[in-house]
Structure formats: C-alpha cells, structure tokens
Amino acid sequence: MKIAIFGSTGFLGKVLLEMALDKGYQIKTLVRDPDKLGEFKDRVEFIHGDIFNVDDIQSTVSGTEAVLSTVGPPNRNTGDPEIYKKSMENIVNILGKENIRRFIHVGGAAHAGGENENWTIGRRFLKQMLSITGPNILLAKQLEWEVLKKSKLDWTLVRPPAILKGKSNSGILSVDEINLGTLKVNVEDLADFILEQITSDLWIKKAPLVSGI
C-alpha cells in the first residue's frame, strides 16, 4: 500500500516514517530539505517542495491510498495561523479530487475537538502554557480542525499532549474523545497508533485524545 506523509522530517514525523517503512508501506513524502530524510532518502519517493504550495501537495498525494500529516506551526516563528487553515483547505480539496478518502492529521490535546470534553486541571495547564508560548499554534490547530469537520473525507484528528522520546514499557494508550489520560505520550506509541488508523474505521470523523496511561 502506498501512503503519503506530510511532516516526515519532524520529531514525530521521522519516527512515523521509519515505522511505516518497517511495516512495508510504500511512501511518498513532501520535504523542504531532502537531506533531512537522512538514511531514508533512498527508501522513499520524495517531492522537494512546500506544504503551502498546491502543486506540491498534488504531486505528493497522487497515486496514494491514504495521507498522514504531522505538519504544524513550529514553536518559534509560528507565523499567521490562517496559512495553515488555507493549507488544510487545499489538502481537503485535492484529496477529494484524487478520490483519496483516508486522512489522518495530528492536532493537540490543548485545543478543543468535540462536545462535552473534560478539561481537567492538567489539560487546562497545557492550554495555558501553550497560550503563553505559542498562541498561534493553538489557533492554527483549531482552524485546521474546523476545516476537517466540514469535509467529506474519512478523517481522524489525533490529539496528543506532550510527546516524549522512545516507547513506553506497556505500549498501552488512553484513547478517548472526552478524557485525556495523562499529560504525556511516547512518540513510538503515538506513531504506532497513527499507523493503525490507516486501516481502522474506529476513529473516523473523530478527534481522539491520545496519551499514555
């Protein structure tokens, strides 16, 4: 199965890329700097471009069956949140034209994602900290989710808290639309969950909070 990955050179994206290759997926990916693919540069089909360019998005997803995205504003110099909304609109439109229904995107536990969510003290703390250090990140992720909600795609918005290195001892995750289990999740556990969603319909058109236990 051939899939596309946006954000494959980031912290989560690198782990997701490696695990997807280990599972036998053929991969197309969009990168601004191909050298950041490192040892995986010769194992994937890459498009040298930008997530804000319509033609680059088109080239990346063409011929794939599912699209994964870990793209989001950087912690520094986040820029205008509206450009991430526009990028999401472009992705949704292109996937519709290409008849690619499965789209899995990564948001965050600090922004809203559904009705009647439980905002614990810990989760409110996450939101407060991000509101101080990266308010545009929160807004960008909320705008992206608003676009997804209106789309006809089989989307899943995965919302983790703080992402830590490695894999947990148990590999067990808390996955819930209302409650956030803990304030952290290990990156390998999170990547594994994202890959499982490619062939699962359990969280389609939902925005689960995904954390360690």
Image (cartoon, rainbow, N blue to C red):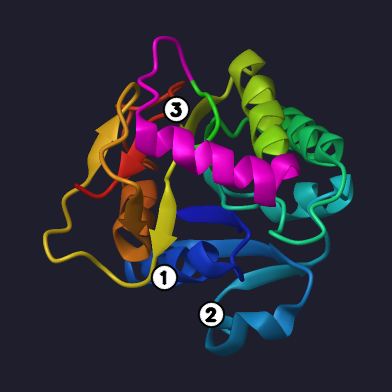
- Quick one: label 2 or label 1, which is nearer the N terminus? 1
Q: Which residue is mark 3?
A: 207
Q: Quadrant of residue 141?
A: top right
Asked if disc 3 and disc 1 are in contact, CB closer than 8 Å, the reply is: no
What separation in Å lies between label 3 and label 2 (alpha carbons)?
31 Å
Rendered residue at 41%/36% (across/down): 123
Q: Quadrant of residue 99?
A: top right
Say whether residue 42 is magenta. no
User: Helix, strand, or loop for circle 3?
Assistant: loop
Q: How many marks?
A: 3
Closer-to-camera residue (208/202): 208
Q: Residues within 10 Å of mark 2 (few under 14, many from 20)?
A: few
Instruction: Give the percent coordinates (x, y) of residue 154.
Output: 50, 25
Give the magenta part as a residue range.
114-137
**In the rendering, which numbered label is found on residue 43?**
2
Q: Which residue is mark 1?
A: 21
